[in-house]
Image (cartoon, rainbow, N blue to C red):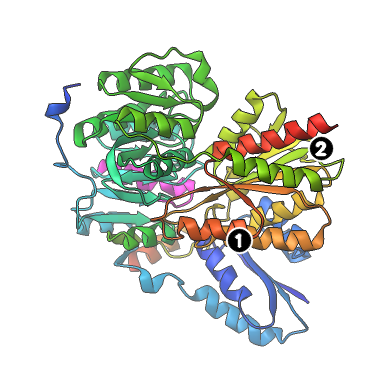
Amino acid sequence: MNSKQTKINSKSRILAPGSRVINAGLAVFEEALTQQGVQVISVQSKPSYKIAPDLKLILDDLI
Amino acid sequence: MKQTFIRKHEYRDSYYLMRVSDEISSRAGVKQATVIMGTPNNKQILEQLGLSSPAVESASSDDLIVAIEFVSPFEIDQFEAEIEQILNRDPGKEQRGQVYHTLETALDENQDAQLVVISTPGNQAVELAREALQRGKHVFCFSHHISVEEELELKRLAIERQLLLMGPDCGTSIIDGIGIGFANQVRRGNIGIVSASGSGLQEVSTLIHKGGGGISQAIGVGGKDMLAPMDGLMSVQAIKMIFQESMTDCLVILGKKSSPLGRKKVLEAARTTGLPIIANFLDENGLMNQDGKLIFAETYENCAKQALKAVGIESTLPTEEKRAQKWLDSVLTRLAPGQWTIRGLFSGGSLCGEAASILDKNGLKITTNLNAAIQSTVSSHVLLDLGDEQYTEGRPHPFIDSRLRNLEIKKAYADQGVAVILLDVVLGWGCNPDPAGEVVRAITEAACEYSNTPGVICSICGTGEDIQGYEQQKNKLVEAGVYVAETNAAAARLALDLITALRKTK
């Protein structure tokens, strides 16, 4: 690896100010990010009632 | 009076279940309520709580159980409708931003997002992680129950795309100053961490903060990354990214379980940075050579001290010998002759591992669930990682939900052989808002119920900037007679000192 002088300082940050994060799952992680000023996009699937797979596909399309 | 409702084939995440449990428990006329998935472990918990019933026994792992004990005979029909309303409500909705029902749509419409956080059940998590990586996004994956084959496939995909896959089974990271998962609020600085250990990362980062230093990036890689067949795949990637993207002057490497090849690859990658390296592999530190650029630290406490020293900061971490001796003397006078064992009840797996390592190296025979489930906790020194998969299936992690540990605390008080209870309290984003209050409640109730009065030692993993407040949490514990150690290692050493002193008095 190159010497310290060639480091890229914060040019390609994963969480630059104002950046957004997608959260799929526990709301507690989403709340923690929001409290830190991160804009969170939530992926929330509906509660998984057990139904026939083909019917579920139709419902997923409708949601 | 008790009542059980079963909602067949309905999955809800553990955090939702805890919130709904709390909401139902707070209703007038309710003595206790637990809403939980019907896994075998959860059924055992309901039995311990006195909430088991034939309906509970017949529930399957994908059924939702609502078990309630009322203070007195109650109008169930009216309450059932209210419970339905509570269950159908989305408790976090008001705090939630834009909601999508598929990751694909969320990615399509938010192309600037660089990170996807995944904490769904394992089978869904693999598909989500794959999709996110294929779309060029970094992934933080808290989910467990993912096979090593799938983990390997996903990590190879991440490396091919020059991305980070933090996890699976990753509890914490601090990226660009933002805590992800269960992270603590620490100052930014010039010490970088790559860690296969979640609570280890938290302990080291908070001790660096308390010692006057700060964190550039702290990247969790998941508990299995340094084991075969990954052999450090993501750790090496994380080391490269930390070196290239941040102003890091010292690198801390935290292994949990690691293969010889994994350790070799990770340390080789670390050496190529030319930075001072402080490494901790729990049990394996004595097996490797160190030199001027590479130091092996046996404890997280020493990791933090060495890292601070490497960046020129004189550590201000306190020592505690006098206070500890005073506490030790007071406990020794009140223990009965048969009390001679340690019961460690940890929410952090690596904190449990660190304590076990310290006790083991000092000659105590320890039983833990770190490598395999244990059958009996009677008549020996037992350290339990209550965040282990066996305890968290279908229920929140103990960083969030203290109920399981509270039960274990009561069991420890009921065990006539227990001389000292060893605990951790973990603060930070995503964690229980008052974990010390939960501990105090459990020991107060247990002390009323049992005549045993074991000593209680607790370390707090957290900082004054954490939302729970370090000092507020510490004060609660101290007022309840708990000895609060400055580090997890110090807590384990004090428990060891107590047992050593007990042996001498025999």
From the viewer's perspective, is B505 left or right of B210? right
Q: Quadrant of the N terminus of chain B?
A: bottom right
Residue at 44% of width from left, 12% of height from top?
B289
> Where residue B228 sits in the image (x, y, percent)?
47, 23
Please name the predominant secondary structure of the magenta segment in the image.
helix
Magenta-tinted stretch: B118-134
Tell me which corner region of the image, top left, top right, bottom left or bottom right, holds residue B311.
top left
From the viewer's perspective, is B423 left or right of B12? right
From the viewer's perspective, is B201 left or right of B177? right
Asked if residue B257 is among those painted magenta in the image, a careful observer would answer no
Q: To which chain does the residue with label 2 belong?
A: B
Residue at 31% of width from left, 59% of height from top?
A36
Q: Is residue B6 visible?
A: yes
Q: Quadrant of the C terminus of chain B?
A: top right
Residue at 47% of width from left, 17% of height from top?
B260
* Residue B379 numbered mark, or none: 2
First of labels 1, 2 by sequence position = 2
The residue to which callout 1 is attached is B438
Amino acid tagged 2: Ser
Q: Is residue A51 visible?
A: no
Residue at 54% of width from left, 77% of height from top?
B86
Q: Nearer the viewer, residue B440 or B385?
A: B440
From the viewer's perspective, is B341 left or right of B238? right
> Where residue B3 sits in the image (x, y, percent)?
73, 74
> Where residue B81 sits in the image (x, y, percent)?
60, 83
Q: Nearer the viewer, residue B239 or B111?
A: B239
Q: Is residue A4 above or below residue B335?
A: above
Residue neighbourhood size for the residue with mark 2, other residues' Cα within 10 Å, grouped as few (<14), some (14–19), many (≥20): some
